[in-house]
Image (tube, coloured by chain):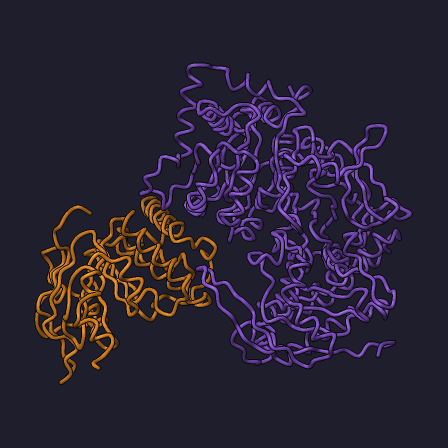
Chain colours: A orange, B purple
Amino acid sequence: MSSNSAILNVETVSLHFGANAALSDVSFDVLRGEIRAIIGPNGAGKTSILNCISGFYRPQQGRILFKGADDLTATPTDRIAALGLARTFQNIALYTGLSTLDNLMAARHIHMKQGMLQSMLYWGPARREEVHHRRIVEEIIDFLEIAHIRKSIVGALPYGLRKRVELGRALAMEPDLLLLDEPMAGMNVEEKEDMARFILDIYERRGITIVLIEHDMGLVMDISDRVVVLDFGQTIADGTPDDIKRDPKVIQAYLGES
Amino acid sequence: MEATAETIPQFFLHQAQTRPPGKVALRQKELGIWREFTWKESYEQVKAFALGLIALGVRRGDKLATVGDNDRQYLWAYLGLQAAGAAQVGLFTDATAAEMAYIIDHCDATFVLAKDQEQCDKLLDVRDRLPQVRRVIYWDERGLWNYDEPWLMPYDEVLALGRALDENEPGRFETEVTLGRADDLALICYTSGTTGLPKGVMLSHGNILSAIRLYQAVDPRADTDNHVSFMPMGWIAEPILGIAAHVFAGVVMNFPEEPETVRQNICEISPEMLFYNSRLWDSLVATVQVRMNDAAWINRNLYHRFLPIGYRMADARFGGTAPGAGLRAAYGLGDRLVFGPLRDQLGLARVRAAYTAGSALSPDAMRFFHALGVNLKQIYGSTEVTGGATIHRDGDIKFASVGPPAPGIDIRIAPDGEVQIAGPTVMMGYYKDPEGTARDMVVEPDGRRWFRTGDAGYIDGDGHVIYLDRVKDMLQLAGGERFSPQFIEGRLKFSPYIRDVMVIGGENRAFVTALIIIDFENTGQWAEKQRIPYTTFVDLSQRPPVYDLIRQAVETVNESLPPGARVRRFVLMHKEFDADEAEMTRTRKLRRNVLYERYGDIVEAMYRGDPTIRVRAPVRYQDGREGFIETEIQVMSLDVAGGG
């Protein structure tokens, strides 16, 4: 957490849908070992920038450097996870018919070395590998306090728990950078506090750099190191939470012109 | 050594010295796997912890308070501190910081063992009220990594101190253990108490060992038996049926993975002895009934086909008549098809004896479990007599009784109907409260000490104790009819749709009324099946079909009551009674005074005959904020034969 090198550089990224500019010339960086928040009003482009980083959208202009080497805008989507980047979604995306455990185990596939045949025979190295991955997954289950739903089918779980399983799945990929898209949306105060505690623990104990999108300013300001504010697809402010709270442009964007 | 052993640590040492090296003493589920620990490993841990405490300055006769979920470190710490000659004071994990501060300070604890961040944070909040506490020892470091607080000390450091002392003074541990005497203070158990401040019940090693001997005489345990440790350690049951059984008979302790996984873990272990409080048995009845209603057609049919046979079998067995060959054959088939698999699902497959205590379990629930083939026995007692004073014997179970006095225990009924108990399990007294001790104890000229339970009851012709109610809670209506609110409440709670009830009546009341709390989960499922839309608890509770559903349950119970004591009006409450809100004790007994005070308007409105009541109820959110909900609740009146 002491290193100041950037793990992610977003450089003049622009994204258009037809004539609509979703992002125009957005630039910011994420340093190793920080919690970086992206905030902004509805439609500001928060999820768009996250989708560009994770390869779901391809921006027309600009580049996104991951660990100073790979340009994510030109990396095939299926390679991005293997580079060490994981994300959660605003609308939870899990295998709803599978158990919590299976969802987390599925996320381990990027780290699995055994081929399909060995895995099907479940013998020797394949078996040892399965045990190894299961241990990592169990540690995450313990960490996120979801042991009681280990065997429960994810689709039947309440919303707050599904959010936690999704976070677990992202952690199971053992990423260097974790993108969280509104991890606290739709939660009550207690669930939000739990989630904030988990995010801080991930950051402190696992040393994972976190990029966090939140609609609601309160908790974000408490837990993030630096905040970038988007409005109408443009960066309008970038700084520490204290700077951001005082920034007139931010206040205007949130409260509207009067 | 067993012949001379007279304390818990002495029995522990005996077990550790005589068990084969590989014999498993305890298990704990971690990362999805049951990890096993042998008596040898357990011995090393207890020794290191005990010596570590001695190195830290703990002296014989000190008190140490412990708070945390049941786990192996809790057990080792418990045995270790007693080995060092100290007494244990168990706190409830959900106690508030203020409650904890009161007890820790009152019991003069010099050290507090607090499992995790949650408990340590509470202690840090009230640190200025705990001048006697030298260190707080924790063993789950999660979240505590960045605390720079020398008051807190990791468990492993205590072990390291202990190992160092062991190297300097080998044999010190054994010497310390030998110093223990049967009349040494072992445990201070603070009773939740329905009124006033909690009282510290002092129990000696002799009290505790007498208590486990009494259970052993009724239901012998062996070292192949399993105990699942999930009851709160602050309550008397776990130190007796768990830890004392562990050191006395070598019963294997099993610690659940998380408090939320207890039910699953019980199914995995399938223990031979099982103790639930009556609330849990009641909720298990509800679970079975609801699950069966949701079950596949064939299972549901089999269940409804065979349950009456189960009831007939249970009634025959306990009515003293031998079941006929036909009934036995039918029951055998039912056991294969329905009851056996059902017991397995509930983790009761291997149970030889299951116990219930707490507030009285309804006779209906008792009958239900015997119909399923579960040997469920009622225990009655109190912390002041180290847990159980009566217990059902195999083949002598009466659904409505709490059983005959346990072996070695004498029970008598005072002229005012109060149950009094004497025997080797009667406590040493209340800690720092000689007046309270004198008030609750009758000392006869022969020196015998009888504990006054404050419970009303009688002993029937077969020597069984029948529990009625608290002496002070037996009520009389204006018309002279006597009734027990708790009895009616117990019957009503047998409905899967009712979670809690408070029954009201008295000398200034002409009839009985009830405040009923619906069971949100079960009633919600029922409503979904009936396609009744609802949003919140308040909304669901006030739906007319829900009122009809509960009315049927009340009418059924009314049929078994004398006409004068029947429930004539009830409301479905807009919120649950909450232990956090001082409305119930931690063992879910109602605090009637508080409830009368809080819900007096509703009660008066029922007696006035108002059709609806406007309520403005204070709610405290989990984050500490206070708010109000405003709503209107309905009063339901019932036609009762013989009433106006």
Please identify the quarter of the rendering in which residue B590 is found: bottom right
Q: The N terminus of chain B lies in which quarter of the figure?
A: top right
Question: Left or right of B184: which side holds B453?
Answer: right
Could one spot residue B130 in this view of the protein?
Answer: yes
Which residue is painted at 70% across and 49% down in the image?
B357
Q: Position of residue B9 (x, y in %)?
A: 59, 26
The relative height of residue B196 versus residue A86 in the rendered view (above or below) is: above
Image location of residue B457, percent across then percent down? 83, 50
- Residue drawn 48% across the image and 37% down it: B113
Locate residue A232 relative to residue B123 in the image: left or right: left
Name the spot of residue A123 as percent of width and height, x first. Answer: 36, 46
Q: Is A192 above or below relative to B604?
A: above
Q: Position of residue B170 (x, y in %)?
A: 47, 15
B404, B326: nearer the viewer: B404
Question: Closer to the camera, B113 or A183?
Answer: B113
Q: Which quarter of the image is occupied by the C terminus of chain B?
A: bottom right
For residue A200, side relative to residue B215 (left or right):
left
Q: Residue furthest bottom?
A: A19
Depicted B210 relative to depicted B623: above or below: above
- The residue lying furthest to the right in this view is B461
The answer to whether A53 appears left or right of B205 in the picture is left
Q: Is residue A108 visible?
A: no
Up-down: is B85 above or below A85? Answer: above
Q: How many marks do you count on the picture?
A: 0
